[in-house]
Structures are given as C-alpha cells and as structure tokens.
Image (spheres, rainbow, N blue to C red):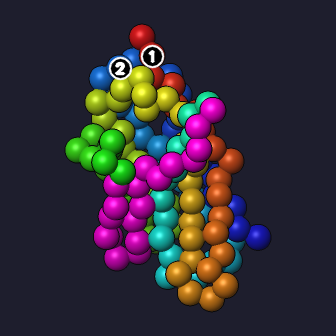
Amino acid sequence: QVQLVESGGGLVQPGGSLRLSCAASGNFFNYNVMGWYRQAPGKQRDLVATIVRGGLTNYADSVKGRFTISRDNAKNTVYLQMNSLKPEDTAVYYCNLRELVGLLQNYWGQGTQVTVSS
C-alpha cells in the first residue's frame, strides 16, 4: 500500500509564497518520477511540475520562474516552493508518484487546497 501525504496548503495573498510537501510511504520502485498537479473548480487536473530521482525537472509554462520543485530521495519526499503567487494559482494541488519500471503504477495524494486571494 502506497500513501502520499501532502501538507503546506492554505490561504495566501497575491505575491506571497507557500511551500508544499509530500511524503511517500509504502512499497514502490525507487526509479520513479514525483510531481505536483493542480485542479481548479470546473477544470481538468493539470501538470504543475515533475522531478525524477536524478533531479531532472519539468514545469508548466504558467509556473516557470515562480515555482521550484525539489525532492529528498532519502525521505521519499517532494517539495514545491511557490513564490509570487497569483489568484489563478488557486486550486487543489495533488502530489503524484509514477513508477518508471515494473507495473508503472501511478499514485495520488488526497490533495491540498491553495487559495490566493486578498
């Protein structure tokens, strides 16, 4: 059983910062990609950023230069540092772990709300 537990969401004013964390536990392959997705009301779930074990990252154009993804492989934890937040960043943010070997399992966290509003 794989669990992804997110933390760090909340309410922040435009221009502010938040840091999300996601800790993975259970049995999964170390050869994986971890990332963050978000879903605003009435919209589909979209990629925010991903990072592989070796550190290679990928970002959505809308967050480049503002968000930074990182991971601590020893702790099986991924982080998302969000700076210069905008109202359009408001969404539920979901942590994801996708195995790159074996059965290519895909796991999701329960989501954490991020609200950017004055």
Residue at the location (29% across, 30% down)? Answer: 84
CB under 8 Å between discs 1 and 2: yes
Is residue 110 rendered to the left or right of residue 20?
right
Q: What residue type is labelled 2?
A: Pro
Relative to 18, does residue 52 appear above or below in the rendering?
Answer: below
**SS at badge 2:** loop
Report the front residue among 35 and 62.
62
Q: Give the range drawn in magenta.
A: 42-59
Residue that carries the numbered disc 1 in the rendered image: 117
**SS at badge 1:** loop
Q: Is residue 30 visible?
A: no
Report the front residue among 40 and 6.
40
Question: Which quadrant of the figure contains the C terminus?
Answer: top left
Q: Is residue 103 visible?
A: yes
Using the numbered discs, state the Cα–Cα distance from disc 1 to disc 2 in whole angstroms. Answer: 6 Å
Residue at the location (57% across, 47% down)? Answer: 45
Check residue 14 in the rendering and tell me which mark sits there, or answer none.
2
* Residue 74 position within the rendered picture, expressed as x and y whole percent measured from the top left: 46, 71
Report which quarter residue 17 is drawn in: top left
Most extreme residue toward the top is 118
Q: What residue type is labelled 1?
A: Ser
* Residue 107 position within the rendered picture, expressed as x and y whole percent measured from the top left: 65, 64
* Residue 51 position within the rendered picture, expressed as x and y whole percent measured from the top left: 39, 65
Relative to 2, does residue 78 appear above or below in the rendering?
Answer: above
